[in-house]
Image (cartoon, helix red, strand yellow):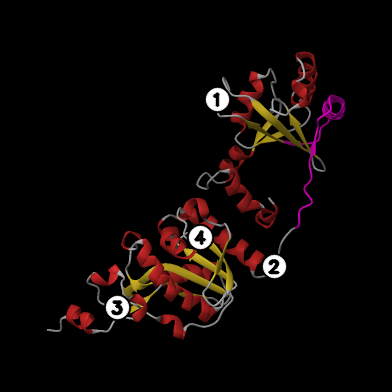
Amino acid sequence: MLNLYSLYNSVDANELCTGCTVLEKEKPCYSVTDYDSLDSNEVLFLSDSFSYRNGSTSPFSKKEMSLFEEVFTRPATYSASVKCPSVKEVDMSPDNMKLCRKHLDKTIERVSPTLVFVCGNLAMKMLIKKSGITSKRGRAYEYEAENGHVCTVVPIFHPYSVIKEPRHRVLFDTDIRNAYDKYVLGKTNTSNFKYEVLTEIDDVVVLSESLRDSDETLALDIETTGLNFLTDIIQTIAISSKEHNWVIPVDHKDSPFKQGEAYNKVMLESVKRILENPRNKKVFHNAKFDLKFLMSYGIHTKNVWDTKIMHHFLDENLPKGLMDLVKLYFPTELESL
């Protein structure tokens, strides 16, 4: 009977793998140096590691490749960030990762991609030395290979997790589409975002008079010194209309409105008139946080809309954080935020 492990141990290890403790584990094969056979491409998808299936190795299963073909119809190259099969994140010490990046650099040098999608936490760690795929997915990072080739790296959910958790499908599709449009096709929006800090009481009063009876939708956000509305204070209130953005330094340490109680009262009364106008919509994200602080200042905001709640009504399975919504609905504006 053929002893696979004896055969495995008789094979000379790749010199780039010298010192890697993964090789001390009993595996039927290792160091799949696929980079000599890879095609040059603008897009490269990297799995965590190769899988050993039916006598051969592959970076993704047939089901996972079928999912890619549904989502991404353009040419792409597929490989693994770790060249040994069935390697888990726990197997990869910092020293092992450092050794294996030599193989990864050869992969990137061969493919010369503009955009690299790292699928999974280990692949992300290998390329950008960060973990936490859920919070990092959809963001862009830069990687420079040993030969000087620079590419954009975007973490995405592994297709296996998308198959197991269909609620991830929308984010998976969106992250791939947005990254390709932006970093390969060059579709971006340049923002001319400007804001005006109101440091004169007359300016606050003028703004109040112009918005107190307006029916124009306003977006609002506050910055505070902490999370407790009973003990912390509002530093600034930001108000945005379709064309303009204003910032009012309420209790900021450098606020000019802290010159005296009467001065501060005029400022708060002006803000109160704006926010208590029932005619226009006031749009917040996670409004309950802002409203509690505003109420502690005697401001009872009317006609409140909350993007966090509205997004939940659209799809209760998607994440509802502010950055998640920006990545989903305004991906081309991220660069300028």
Mark 4 secondary-structure assignment? strand
For discs 3 and 4, the disc positioned in front in the rendered view: 4
The residue sitting at the left extreme is: 1
In the rendered image, the vertical position of residue 250 relative to residue 337, given as above or below: above
Q: Which disc number belongs to residue 186?
A: 2
Residue linked to disc 3: 54
Q: Quadrant of residue 333?
A: bottom right
Is any part of residue 182 visible from this angle? yes
Q: Alpha carbon of mark 1 to alpha carbon of mark 3: how far?
A: 58 Å
Residue linked to disc 1: 228
Amino acid on which the number 3 mark rests in the picture: Asn
Ranked by sequence position, the earlier of labels 2 and 4 is 4
Ranked by sequence position, the earlier of labels 3 and 2 is 3
Q: Which residues are magenta?
A: 190-219
Q: Which disc number belongs to residue 156?
A: 4
Residue 12 spot, x, y in % from top left: 27, 84
User: Would you say the residues marked 3 and 2 are in contact, meaning their CB atoms lie under 8 Å apart?
Assistant: no
Amino acid on which the number 2 mark rests in the picture: Gly
Ranked by sequence position, the earlier of labels 1 and 3 is 3
Is any part of residue 277 visible from this angle? no
